[in-house]
Image (cartoon, rainbow, N blue to C red):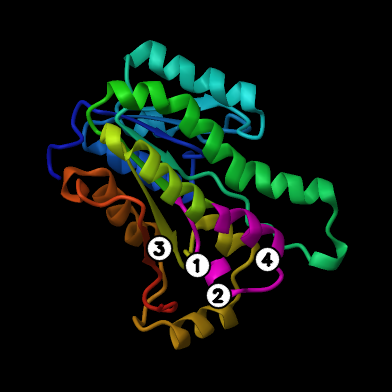
Amino acid sequence: MTDEFNGKVAVVTGGSSGIGGAVVKELAQRGCRAYFCSRHGDEFDLAGQTGGLAIGATCDLTDSRQTQAWIADVIAKEGHIDYLVNNVAFDGRRAFAEATLEEYDQFIAINLKAAFVTAQAALPGLRAGSGRAIVSMGTTNWMLGLSPFTLYSSAKSGLIGFTRALARELGPEGIRANMVSPGWVMTAKQLELYVTEQDKKDLLRDQALPFLLEEAHIVPPILFLLSEGAKAITGQNLVVDAGKYMQ
């Protein structure tokens, strides 16, 4: 994959920080023009770190019109899209008994609907591109049935059905759709808001591999599924969690 991404065009939703930011940076370092978005228009210093190959935009992905307009602008500038990474997510904790319909709608809008709207808007660009690969970011959270994540799991688990059906529907055109489902990744946000020292100990106890996950462990599998090396792989969910969840 050394030169494969050079000169290509990628779209990464919510790619200003965390796993998405790491994907954007890696793609840009490989010569790919990586378009990403942030709801509040922050952390666009990625452009400066990558010689302008990381291109940020302000976009609220819960607003379908904003999303469609952003993708249309990318296609208008580039003429095509080679890769789409549906990365944006919201993993807030909310007890089922206390949740409101408005909160449920928010989880669905960010974690599931945004992937649908973005992929549909990007389809003309993907058809015109040569990479023709979609990767959506899942999670092992719903596979493990963790609490209090009923709202989050409802939305994220929908991505596997979306991915498999999309792979079947777009496969005749040579467009692939896959998922990467990480375990608990020690991003700056997770460390600041949620992760405790006991959580770290529990992870190291329950995982087969004795190290905490970082963004650097998740990026290579994503790039693999985007690459020609995965040309015969579609409709799959690749779990990257250091061996905590095993089917």
Point out which mark residue 140 bears: 1
**Quadrant of the image occupied by residue 204:** bottom left
Q: CA distance from mark 2 to mark 3?
A: 20 Å
The kind of residue on which mark 2 rests is Leu
Identify the mark nearer the N-term, 3 or 4. 4
Identify the residue position indicated by label 3 in the image.
Answer: 214
Q: Which mark sits nearer the N-terminus, 2 or 3? A: 2
Magenta region, residue range: 137-158
Q: Which mark is residue 144?
A: 2
Residue type at the position of mark 4: Phe
Discs 3, 4 touching: Cβ within 8 Å? no
Separation (CA) of disc 3 from disc 4: 22 Å
In which quadrant of the rendered view does residue 54 lie?
top left
Farthest-out residue, top? 76
In the rendered image, which residue does mark 4 sit on? 149
**Residue 26 relative to residue 58: left or right:** left
> The N terminus lies in which quarter of the figure?
top left
Q: CA distance from mark 2 to mark 4?
A: 10 Å
Q: Nearer the viewer, residue 131 or 91?
A: 131
